[in-house]
Amino acid sequence: MNAPIPLEELLSAKTGKRSVVIGLPAAGGVVEHRFPLTPEGAGMLVARGFCVKMEKGAAEYIHYSDAAYTRCGVEIVERAEALAADIVVYLPPMDVADARRLKKGSLLLSFIHNRETDRETVRTLVDRHVIALALELICDEAGHRPFADILHEIDGRAAIAIASSLLADAVHGKGILLGGVAGVVPCEVMVIGSDMAAVAAAKGAIGMGAIVRIFDDNIYRMREAAAMLGPGAICSSLHPRVFENGLRSADIVVATDTAPRCGVVGADLVGTMKRGVICFDLTSAPGSAFPSLPLVDLDLASPSDNSVTEPTRLCYINAGNAVPRTVAMALSNTFVTMLDDLTVCDGVANALKLKDGLRKAAYTFLGKCVNPAVARIAGLRSVDINLFLQFS
C-alpha cells in the first residue's frame, strides 16, 4: 500500500507595499455642508485596497454617523491623522494651520476658491511639496469636467426646488405654485446662460409646469440646450429689449456662467423686476450676477434669513450646498473612478504624465506653483508642469 504523498499548497504572498491612506478631515472652522464620500463610496475604496481614515463627526452635515462609516471599513481618527494621509480630500478652503499638517509630498484634492484662497496657505503647500489638484478643473478624455458638471447640475436642480418652496411660502413668499393649474397662468422662470447648470434649472422648471425662457448670446451652446430641453423652453439671444422684458415678468431668475456683457444684472434692471422675485446666482463668482441685491448664502441660511413681512428681492447663492447629501452621493461615484485611475497609473506623478485632464488640474506640484491664477494670489512665479514631468 502506497503512503500518502504530500502536495504543495499555494499560499498568498505578502509584499511590503502598504495601502495608500485617504484622509477625510471635517470642514473645520469654516461652514461647508458638502462632504466628498458616503459610507458606501468609502467602502468601495476600502474594497479596492485603500485605507480610508475619517475625522470624527466629519459627515454630520450629510446625516451619516461615524458608525455607518466604520461598518464600511473606515477608520475614525483625530483631525491630525486624517490630514497626515497620503491623499487628503478637503472641499472648503484650507487654512495655513491645516496645510502645515499635510504630509510632505502628499496629494490634496480640493476646489480652488480664488476669492477665499489664502496666500500663505498656497505658499505652505509649495513648501511642503504637496501635489494639489483642483477638482473642478479635472477633465476626462472627452474634455468633460466630471466634478464641475455634476455640481453644476445639482446647483441648477436645487435652485428650482428651493425657489418653488420659497414661492409657495404663504407667510414670507407669495403663496403661489410654480406650475399653474387650470385657469391660472404658471410662473415664469428666466435662465441666463445655457450651460449645465442652466439646462438643469430649465429641466426642473419645465417639469414643474413653469414657463421657461433661456437667454444666451452663444448661439451654438444655446442650440444644444434647446435640443436637450425640447419645445418646453423658449430660447432667445440677448436682445436688450427682449432681455429686459423677460426680467420684468419673471418670478424666478437664475444666472449661470455666460458672456460678460450679459452676466451682470445691475441696479437699474433690478429695479424693473417684480417685488418678491427670487434670484439665484449660480456663477463661478457667487454674488456677482446681481451686485445690488442682498445675498443669502444657503450654506449659512436659517429660516430667519427670509423672515421679511412682505415679499422683497433677494439673491441666493450656493444652492447645491443646501442638498449636501445628494452632493456626497454624486461625488462618491466620481471619486471612486478617479482614484481607480491613480491606482492603474501606479502613482500620482505617472497619472499626471499619462492623463492630460489631471495634469491641467494641478495648481501646486513638488515645490512649485503650476497654475497662473493661484500663483498670482500667492505672489509666486508660475511654472509649466510639463517641464517637471518631462524630466522626472
Image (cartoon, helix red, strand yellow):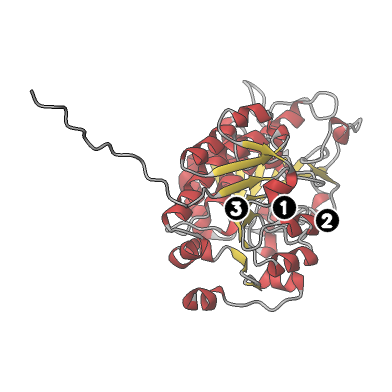
- Residue 129, relative to residue 97: is it above or below? below
Mark closer to the chain start, 3 or 2: 3
Q: Amino acid at mark 3?
A: Ile
Q: Secondary structure at mark 1?
A: helix
Which residue does the image show at 74% across and 48% down from the upper left? 80
Q: Amino acid at mark 1?
A: Glu
Q: Amino acid at mark 2?
A: Asp
Q: Which x, y percent locates residue 70?
A: 61, 30
Which residue does the image show at 63% across and 37% down from the upper left? 75
Q: Are marks 3 and 1 in contact (CB under 8 Å)?
A: no
How far apart marks 3 and 1 lie (CA) works out to: 49 Å
Q: Nearer the viewer, residue 385 or 320?
A: 385
- Residue 53, relative to residue 369: is it above or below? above
The dot on residue 96 is: none
Q: Residues within 10 Å of mark 3 (few under 14, many from 20)?
A: many
For the image, the number of numbered tags is 3
Q: Which residue is mark 1?
A: 244
Q: Secondary structure at mark 3?
A: strand
Mark closer to the chain start, 1 or 2: 1
Is residue 251 visible in the rendered structure shown here? yes
Q: Which x, y percent locates residue 367?
A: 65, 72
Left or right: residue 63 compared with residue 42: right
Q: Which residue is mark 2?
A: 268
Q: Are marks 1 and 2 in contact (CB under 8 Å)?
A: no
The dot on residue 87 is: 3
How far apart marks 3 and 2 lie (CA) works out to: 48 Å
Is residue 281 visible in the rendered structure shown here? no
Mark closer to the chain start, 3 or 1: 3
